[in-house]
Amino acid sequence: MTTSTDTYAVPGVGAGLLDVYRRRYLLKLIVRKELRVRYRGSVLGLAWSYVKPLVQYVVLFFALGIVLRVGDQIPNYALYMFSGVIVINFFSEAFSNATRSIVSNAALVKKIYLPRELFPVASVWVAAVHFLPQLVVLLAAALLSGWKPDFMQLIGAVLGFVIVAVTATGLGLLAGAINVFFRDAENIVDMLMMIVTWTSPVLYDWTMIRRLAPPWVLFIYQLNPITVAVELFHWAFWYPTVDRPVELPPHLMWTGLIGLGMAALFLIIGQLVFRRLEGHFAQEV
Amino acid sequence: MGAAIIVKGLKKTFNLRHSHSLKETLVWLVKGRKSDLSKKFDALHDVSFEIQPGETVALLGFNGSGKSTLLKLISGVILPDQGTVRTKGRVAGLIEVGAGFHPDLSGRENVFLNAAILGMTEQEINDKFDEIVAFSEIEQFIDTEVKFYSSGMFLRLAFAVAVHTQPDIFLVDEILAVGDEPFQKKCLAKIKQLSDEGRTLVVVSHDLDMIARICDRGVVLASGTVQFEGPADQAVAWLRDSN
C-alpha cells in the first residue's frame, strides 16, 4: 500500500477468521438466530435435541445388542458405539450445515458486507450446541456403566472435540465456498456423510481393519482426523468402563496431536480457498 | 486530512448467465475453454471520483446506469474487477431496507442483530436501544416477529437502526421511497443532522427534488461511466436535460 492511502480500508477485504474472532458478539447473535429459527413453532424446542440422541442410544442398545449380538465381540458395545456416533453426528451436522451456510444466508451476503466466514463458523457452533445434549446422554450412560476416567482421558475427549470442530470448520469453509458456484457440493457432502460413519471405527473396532488390510492402509485409515477423534472418545468414555482386556490403538495422545495437525491443515486450506472465492459470493449466490 | 472515499479507475463486469452445472463446466474445460462460458456485461467502466469528509453526495442516473453497483462496491459487498476503492472510517450501508432482518425474529432481536451486522458493539447497542425504538415509533410491536410488520413499520425500524450506528460514511440506497410523510421528514432531518456532525453521506435516489435539496454534490452515471460531476442542483438539471 502506498503512503497516501495507508489509513484507508479496502472495502470487502477482511482478515478472514480473525475477523470472526473480533466480531464474536455478532457471531453469538447469528448462532442464536439459527437456533431460534430452527425451533420456531416447536413446543419442545431445544428439548428435541435430548430426545433424539436418547432414542438413538436405545436403538443401538436393542438392535445391535439383542438382534445382531455385537456385544459378544465388543464389551459395553452400546456405549462404545454411542461415543463414536455422537462424534459423527457432530461432524456431519457441522459440515453439511456449514456447506449450505453461505447459500442459505444469500439475503445477507448480497446486501451487506460482513465477514462471510461467520456463517460456516456459526454452523459449527450450532452443531456444538446440539452436541451438548448428546454428551449428556453419553455421560449418563457411562456413569451407569461405572465410568471412572483419569485426567488424561478427559483431556483426550476435549482434544477429540477440538479436532472435529476444526476439521468441520475447515472443510465447511471449503465446501461452503464451492457450493456458491456449484450446488453439487452439498450433494457430494451428503454422500460423504454416508461414508464417513464407515471410514471410522464407529460400528466396528479398529482391530478388524488391522486384520483385513495391509499396514499402509491402516496408517492412512488412522490419519483421518475423525477416526482419531472417535478413538479418543472411545478411550475417554468407553475404555474406563470395560472390565475385560481390550485393545485400543497405541499412542492415542500422539495420534491425537497428528489428528489436530491434519485438522489445522484442513482449516488453512479451507480458509485460503474461501478467501479466493469470497469476492464473487455476492454476485453469484 | 484526505478524502473520505477514493474511487479510482473502477471497472465491474457481471456474468449474464449464472446457472451452469458442474457438468457443463467440465465439458467446457475438456473442450479447452473455447468461447466464454457466459456472456459478460460491463456494469461500471473507468469510474473515478473522490468524496470529501462531511460531504453529502448523490449518485444519479436512470435505471441500470450502475448506481447501486457502485454503492455495493463502496460498501464492500462486491469487489471491483479493476481499479480501487478506499474508505476511511466506519462504513454503514443501507443498500436495501431491512437487509439484515430475519422475518422469524422479533423486532427487538432484529435490532440487535442488524446493529451488530452494521458494526456496533454490544455496549453501543444496549446504550442506544431505547433511542432506536423511540425513533422508529413502534414501541408497541417491538416484541412481535417482524414477519407480521407492515412495510412501513419495517422501514421505520430498519432506518432507525441504521442512523444510530454512528457511521463515518453512510450509504443510502433508495430507502426513503416508502414511509409516510411525517416519517420521511424525520428521516431527512436525521440525515441533515448526521451531515452536520461531519459524517459523509452517499445517497442514491430517484427523488430528484429531494436530492437537490439535501445534497451538496451530484455524480451522474450513465451506462456505467461518470457523465457529470458538480453541484447537486446542476447535476439534477443535467440529468433532466439529458432525457
Image (cartoon, rainbow, N blue to C red):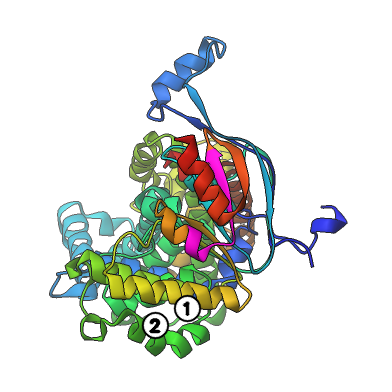
- Residue position for label 2: B132
Residue at 60%, 38% in the rendered image? B227
Quick check: B12 left or right of A243?
Answer: right
- Alpha carbon separation for disc pair 2 and 1: 7 Å
Residue A202 drawn at (x, y percent):
37, 54
Residue A41 visible to an observer of this rendering: yes
* Chain name for mark 2: B
Q: In this orientation, which residue lies closer to the viewer: B127 or B176?
A: B176
Residue nearer the viewer, A27 or A145? A27
Q: Quadrant of residue A240?
A: bottom left
- Dot 2 falls on a residue whose secondary structure is helix
Same chain for mark 2 and mark 1? The answer is yes
The quadrant where residue A105 appears:
bottom left
Q: Can residue B76 be spotted in the picture?
A: no
- What segment carries the magenta color? B212-221
Residue under the point 39% across and 42% down: A189
Instruction: Classify the position of the C terminus of chain A by image quarter.
Output: top left
Above or below residue A96? Residue A30 is below
Please, what is the three-letter code of the amino acid marked with disc 2? Ile
Mark 1 residue type? His
**Contact flag, marks 2 and 1 (Cβ < 8 Å):** yes
**Label 1: few (<14), some (14–19) or many (≥20) C-alpha neighbours in 10 Å:** many
First along the sequence among labels 2 and 1: 2
Q: Chain of mark 1?
A: B
Q: Is residue A5 left or right of residue A195?
A: right
Circle on res. B164: 1
- Which secondary structure, mark 1? loop
